[in-house]
Image (cartoon, rainbow, N blue to C red):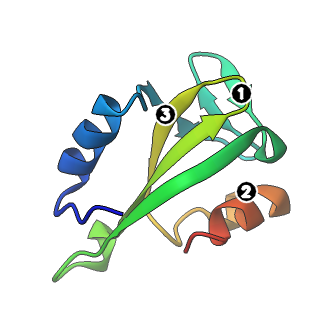
C-alpha cells in the first residue's frame, strides 16, 4: 500500500489505476450516476486514512471500490460522521477497514 500525503494525491493515483467513478455514500449503498451498489455488490480493495494534524474535522478515508461487473471508483468519507444514518449492513461493510 502506497503512502500518499493528501487526499487529492491519492485520488489522482487511484484514477490512474482505473478507479474512475466517484461514488457517493447513501444510507444502504454507494451510488454513482444513478447506479447503486449495495454492500454485497462491491469490494473495498484498499483504503487510505488521513488525519487532520490540528482539526479532527479534517479526518477522512479514501476507499478504492470495485464490483464483480468491473466497475471501479473511489469513495471519500469523513470517519465517524455518518454512522447513525447508514444501515447496519453498510456500517459493517465500511467498518472492516477502519
* Residue furthest bottom in the image: 54
- Depth order, front residue of 93/14: 14
- Depth order, front residue of 50/19: 19
- Element type where label 1 sits in the image: strand
- Element type where label 2 sits in the image: loop
Answer above or below: position of 89 versus 52: above
- Whether label 3 touches label 2, CB < 8 Å: no
Residue under label 2, please give it: 86
Residue 17, image x, y percentages: 35, 34
Q: Distance between the residues labelled 2 and 1?
A: 15 Å
Q: Distance between the residues labelled 3 and 1?
A: 12 Å
Judged left or right of residue 29, residue 55 is: left
Answer above or below: position of 73 versus 54: above
Residue 36 — which label? 1
Which badge, 3 or 1, is on the more N-terminal residue? 1
Closest to the camera, between mark 2 and mark 1, is: 1
Residue 94, image x, y percentages: 64, 62
Residue under label 3, please give it: 73
Residue 89, image x, y percentages: 83, 58
Which badge, 3 or 2, is on the more N-terminal residue? 3
Which badge, 2 or 1, is on the more N-terminal residue? 1
- Depth order, front residue of 19/76: 19
Amino acid at each position: 500500500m502506497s503512502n500518499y500525503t493528501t487526499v487529492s494525491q491519492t485520488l489522482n493515483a487511484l484514477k490512474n489505476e482505473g478507479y474512475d467513478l466517484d461514488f457517493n455514500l447513501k444510507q444502504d449503498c454507494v451510488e454513482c450516476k444513478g447506479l447503486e451498489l449495495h454492500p454485497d455488490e462491491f469490494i473495498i480493495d484498499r483504503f487510505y486514512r488521513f488525519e487532520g494534524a490540528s482539526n479532527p474535522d479534517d479526518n477522512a478515508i479514501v476507499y478504492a471500490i470495485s464490483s464483480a461487473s468491473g466497475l471501479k471508483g473511489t469513495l471519500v468519507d469523513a470517519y465517524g460522521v455518518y454512522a447513525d444514518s447508514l444501515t447496519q449492513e453498510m456500517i459493517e461493510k465500511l467498518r472492516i477497514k477502519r
